[in-house]
Image: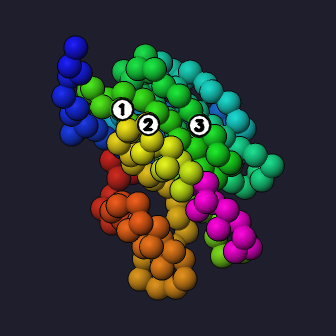
């Protein structure tokens, strides 16, 4: 049997730096999303305890938080994709990936929250190593990939810019920094 052709065109993936660790903040987020078209949302700096949670409407929120209460990443998957054999991969409280199917494509959405300048360089390097692991596994599993989150990087200056550009080039990724207003704002 020949698998159906892969059509990842038209997927709506967004990133948002949002502290969704309280019921109030989560309810606000769901209110912002009401009536919007989206498939996956990648969150950084969530400050939300680690869990898998089914939200109103059947959407599934995967949150990852370790020992650092000021970190955390999350991935919100729209209800229409929940039945597609999803698998969450936790690398740390700064990197998590969700494998799922979209229109015959196997996709991996990776949420990232890079440490800001106040953290040691070792944590930055460790986070990039975890991201490399997520991408290496993706290639072995023949998945298409999208990486999103807060890289805490100024795109036109500094060492962190060079690290991000080197990383993106080494993994054949494009850097996209939307300067337009997001649909939920």
Majority secondary structure of magenta residues: helix
Q: Residue furthest right?
A: 67
Provide the residue designation for mark 3: 89
Q: Is residue 91 above or below residue 156?
A: above
- The local crowd at label 1, few if under 14, some if 14 to 19, many if 20 or more residues have their Cα within 10 Å, is many
Q: Are marks 2 and 3 in contact (CB under 8 Å)?
A: no
Q: Earlier in the sequence, mark 2 or mark 3?
A: 3
Provide the residue designation for mark 1: 106
Give the residue displayed 51% in from the left and 74% down from the top. Answer: 163
Q: Position of residue 37 (x, y in %)?
A: 30, 35
Provide the residue designation for mark 2: 141
- In space, the residues marked 1 and 3 are separated at their CA atoms by 15 Å
Q: Residue furthest bottom?
A: 157
The answer, for residue 72, to whether it is visible in the render is no
The answer, for residue 135, to whether it is visible in the render is yes
- In space, the residues marked 2 and 3 are separated at their CA atoms by 13 Å
Q: Between residues 173 and 71, which one lies in front from this camera angle?
A: 173
| Left or right, residue 15 beside residue 69 | left
Q: Between residues 73 and 1, which one lies in front from this camera angle?
A: 1
Q: Are marks 2 and 1 in contact (CB under 8 Å)?
A: yes
Q: Quadrant of the N terminus?
A: top left
Q: Position of residue 134 (x, y in %)?
A: 53, 48
Segment tinted magenta in the rendering: 119-131
- The local crowd at label 3, few if under 14, some if 14 to 19, many if 20 or more residues have their Cα within 10 Å, is some
Give the residue displayed 33% in from the left and 47% down from the top. Answer: 183
């Amino acid at each position: 049997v020949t698998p159906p052709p892969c059509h990842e065109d038209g997927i709506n993936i967004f990133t948002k730096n949002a502290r969704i660790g309280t019921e109030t903040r989560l309810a606000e987020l769901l209110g912002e999303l009401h009536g919007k078209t989206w498939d996956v949302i990648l969150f950084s700096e969530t400050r939300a305890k680690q869990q898998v949670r089914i939200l109103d409407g059947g959407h599934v929120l995967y949150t990852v938080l370790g020992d650092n209460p000021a970190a955390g990443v999350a991935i919100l998957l729209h209800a229409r994709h929940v039945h597609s054999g999803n698998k969450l991969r936790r690398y740390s409280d700064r990197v998590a990936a969700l494998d799922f199917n979209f229109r015959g494509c196997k996709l991996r959405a990776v949420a990232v929250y890079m440490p800001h300048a106040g953290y040691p360089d070792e944590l930055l390097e460790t986070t990039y190593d975890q991201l490399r692991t997520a991408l290496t596994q993706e290639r072995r599993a023949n998945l298409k990939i999208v990486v999103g989150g807060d890289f805490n990087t100024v795109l036109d200056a500094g060492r962190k810019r060079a690290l991000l550009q080197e990383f993106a080039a080494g993994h054949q990724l494009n850097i996209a920094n939307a300067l337009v207003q997001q649909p939920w704002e």
